[in-house]
Image: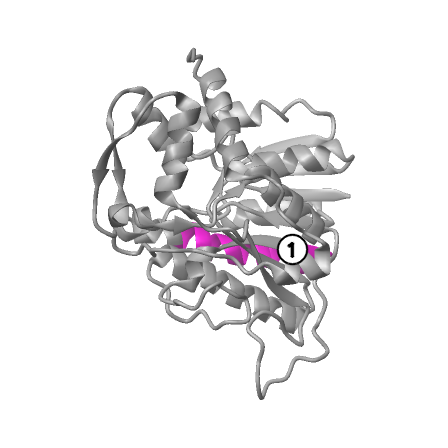
Amino acid sequence: MRILVTGAAGFIGSSVTLRLLQRGDCVVGVDNHNDYYDPAIKEARLARHVGHDRYTHLRLDIADRKAVERLFADHSPDRVVHLAAQAGVRFSIENPLAYIDSNIVGFVHILEGCRRVKVEHLVYASSSSVYGANTAMPYSVHHNVDHPLSLYAASKKSNELMAHTYSHLYQLPTTGLRFFTVYGPWGRPDMALFKFTKAILADEKIQVFNFGKHRRDFTYVDDIVEGVVRVLDRPAMPNPAWQGGSPDPGSSSAPWRVYNIGNSKPIELMAYIRVLEAALGREAIIDFQPLQPGDVPETYADVADLVEQFHYRPSTSFEEGVTSFVSWYREYFNIRP
């Protein structure tokens, strides 16, 4: 198949691209290479697949309507994995318009492209952040998610609603995947594991929010990629049992679905830090801070639908995942143990 991957120089996008190339697909990768974090790591990720004879890379911004129109007209993908987005809960509080441009305007450009070339399946990144003020655990796609706590979360909820409209009006199969705290080699420098590792190795303080009482459903990147590919291969179908009188938030009478994709084993942040200390052979200097605006104290994914429908089950423990990340970090930055 010819598959379009947006955000192909990103953390998850690069790994998805490699997996698709390894199994024989042709991939068109798109990324705007912005400087939200150090672009050097994006270039390094990209170097892993640029030059492959079945890979084409385009540097463009999905908020540029004409550029996206040309992209779809020139390459006419069979399926699309849409991972490009402005990420980060806290950054959305300081820079809300960046999220409108990329996550709202950019997303509708992708939807329009998919509609025009009759894409077989659009799989796109949603987020556990959509659960917002919900406190019922584990988070289920069959729960309503109407109370986001950040504009980032609201933008991802908006993506799900926009996708539903296109699935209903144009019979475009769409599937949203709500990612839960993805980590691993080649990860984002703005995320906790990367920042903690850098600070601990420099004997600097790490800020631990909510006074260390966070629990997160940390999910290793290889497990995420496995789920993305499995879902991509089975276009969303209507739910014949769906009823408007008692609507299921996780499915539809249209070819539209959303799924949680997480480890389904929430870990206390302090336990996570202890494993990181062991892998680094150093103790962290901890600066405890209160809960930050837009943040939630706990995430916990109910992945029953993915297990039942796709036989998906994450296999990487957080001890293995953290150790793997530290090994990559030392090699990437040429740091000796």
Can residue 191 be seen at all in this image of the molecule?
no
Q: Is residue 328 magenta?
A: no
Identify which residue is drawn at 25% across, 38% down. 207
Residue 119 at x, y percent in the picture: 71, 55
Q: Please say if 123 is above or below 321.
A: below
| Amino acid under disc 1 | Leu
Identify which residue is drawn at 49% across, 63% down. 139
Question: What residue is pinned by disc 1?
Answer: 122
Count how many numbered circles sit on residues in the image: 1
Residue 3 at x, y percent in the picture: 70, 43
Residue 4 at x, y percent in the picture: 65, 44
Task: Please give the range of residues in magenta.
Answer: 100-122
Q: Main secondary structure of the magenta part?
A: helix
In the structure shown, which secondary structural element does the residue marked by tag 1 occupy?
strand
Q: Place residue 70 in its image quadrant.
A: top right
**In which quadrant is the N terminus drawn?**
top right
Q: Is residue 102 magenta?
A: yes
Identify which residue is drawn at 63% across, 42% down. 315
Q: Nearer the viewer, residue 160 or 268?
A: 268
Q: Please say if 25 is above or below 281.
A: below
**In which quadrant is the C terminus drawn?**
top left
Q: Please say if 184 is above or below 68.
A: above
